[in-house]
Image (cartoon, helix red, strand yellow):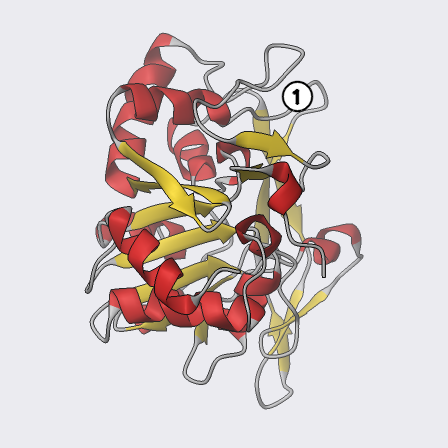
């Protein structure tokens, strides 16, 4: 059993503290059995960050990408990024950005600054992902590999990788009062010959350079690092290798700590696969 107090202590051991802005990708089941589930985990993060900190999670809605002229409902559309993200999305006072596919939810001192503006591209300088850079945020991968670190797409767009291109999608936004208005959306999609990302490669280089704190929160192997360090190293390494972010081998780049288990896109990084919690 993983308690709230244990989660708080282990997050602090990973370098998290009051006043920080923290962006979390997560797998609740990786932690093991947590009484209170996702709500307990959210409470623990908020306790660590305090009243001056801000917790941010992805609340992506991929289903809209498969629909014609979809409507993004800012208040009602559930997050497709796991139980912890949905638990934060529904908290009183949370702010959510307006993007068809790649919205974020934020709670805390900088929430409005982060979520107030979200331009047509998810990863550009006029949206929340770049605000994480401006605010010197930390990324936490809670029981998931670097493969799931969507912030690395910011670097891809910044350097204009050759294997992605722009696609415009007609979409709509339903506001809190029920009114519907156009929602300009540009997607930075992989070209037809794109084989997929392997963000573990950049993650491994970040660890080699000493930028990542690695530990465990319950059974979840957890990594914490600064957005600014990831951007600086990512751009520098891309200049040397334009395929830095691309899957170039049969298997994804191995991680230095933790056991990877689970099917593709639902991978977990854990201390012991037998301790993954199944409700």
If the image is split into quadrants, where does the C terminus sit?
bottom right
Q: Place residue 212 in its image quadrant.
A: top left
- Residue 174 percent location from the top left of the image: 63, 77
Q: Is residue 124 visible?
A: no
**Residue drawn 52% across the image and 35% down it:** 145
Between 265 and 114, the one lying in front of the other is: 265
Q: Is residue 37 left or right of residue 154?
A: right
The residue closer to the viewer here, 169 or 36, is 36
Relative depth, front residue between 33 and 240: 33
Q: Quadrant of residue 93?
A: bottom left
Q: Position of residue 120 (x, y in %)?
A: 51, 54
**Side of 165 relative to 202 (left or right):** right
Residue sitting farthest toward the front: 1
Q: Position of residue 85 (x, y in %)?
A: 54, 63
Mark 1, other Cα within 10 Å: few <14 / some 14–19 / many ≥20: few
Horizontal and vertical percent position of residue 260: 59, 31
In depth, the one of 155 and 16 nearer the eye is 16
* Residue at image mark 1: 194
Q: Secondary structure at mark 1?
A: loop
Residue at 38% across, 33% down: 158
The residue sitting at 48% across, 80% down in the picture is 91
Relative to 169, residue 208 above or below: above
Count of marks, rendered view:
1
Q: Determine which quarter of the picture holds residue 135.
A: bottom left
Decide if residue 156 is on the left or right side of residue 186: left
Q: Is residue 115 visible?
A: yes
Q: Residue at x 57, y 68 (%)?
A: 37
Question: Looking at the picture, does residue 159 appear above or below residue 136?
Answer: above
């Amino acid at each position: 059993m993983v308690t709230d107090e244990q989660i708080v202590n282990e997050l602090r051991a990973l370098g998290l503290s009051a006043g920080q802005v923290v962006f979390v990708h997560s797998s609740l089941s990786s932690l093991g059995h947590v009484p209170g589930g996702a709500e307990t985990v959210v409470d623990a993060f908020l306790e660590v960050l305090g009243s001056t900190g801000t917790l941010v999670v992805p609340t992506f809605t991929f289903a809209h990408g498969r629909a014609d002229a979809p409507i993004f409902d800012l208040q009602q559309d559930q997050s497709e990024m796991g139980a912890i993200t949905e638990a934060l999305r529904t908290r009183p006072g949370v702010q959510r950005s307006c993007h068809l596919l790649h919205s974020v939810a934020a709670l805390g001192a900088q929430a409005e600054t982060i979520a107030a503006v979200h331009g047509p591209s998810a990863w550009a300088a006029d949206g929340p992902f770049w605000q994480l850079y401006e605010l010197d945020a930390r990324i936490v991968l809670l029981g998931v590999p670097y493969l799931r670190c969507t912030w690395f797409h910011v670097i891809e767009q910044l350097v204009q990788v050759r294997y992605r291109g722009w696609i415009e999608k007609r979409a709509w936004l339903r506001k809190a009062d029920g009114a519907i208005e156009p929602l300009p959306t540009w997607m930075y999609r992989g070209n037809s010959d794109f084989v997929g990302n392997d963000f573990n490669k950049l993650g491994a280089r970040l660890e080699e350079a000493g930028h990542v704190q690695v530990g465990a929160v319950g059974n979840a192997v957890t990594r914490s690092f600064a957005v600014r360090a990831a951007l600086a190293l990512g751009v520098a390494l891309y200049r040397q290798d334009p395929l830095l972010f691309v899957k170039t081998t049969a298997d994804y780049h191995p991680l230095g700590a933790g056991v990877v288990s689970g099917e593709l896109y639902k991978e977990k990084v854990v201390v012991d696969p037998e301790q993954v919690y199944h409700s």
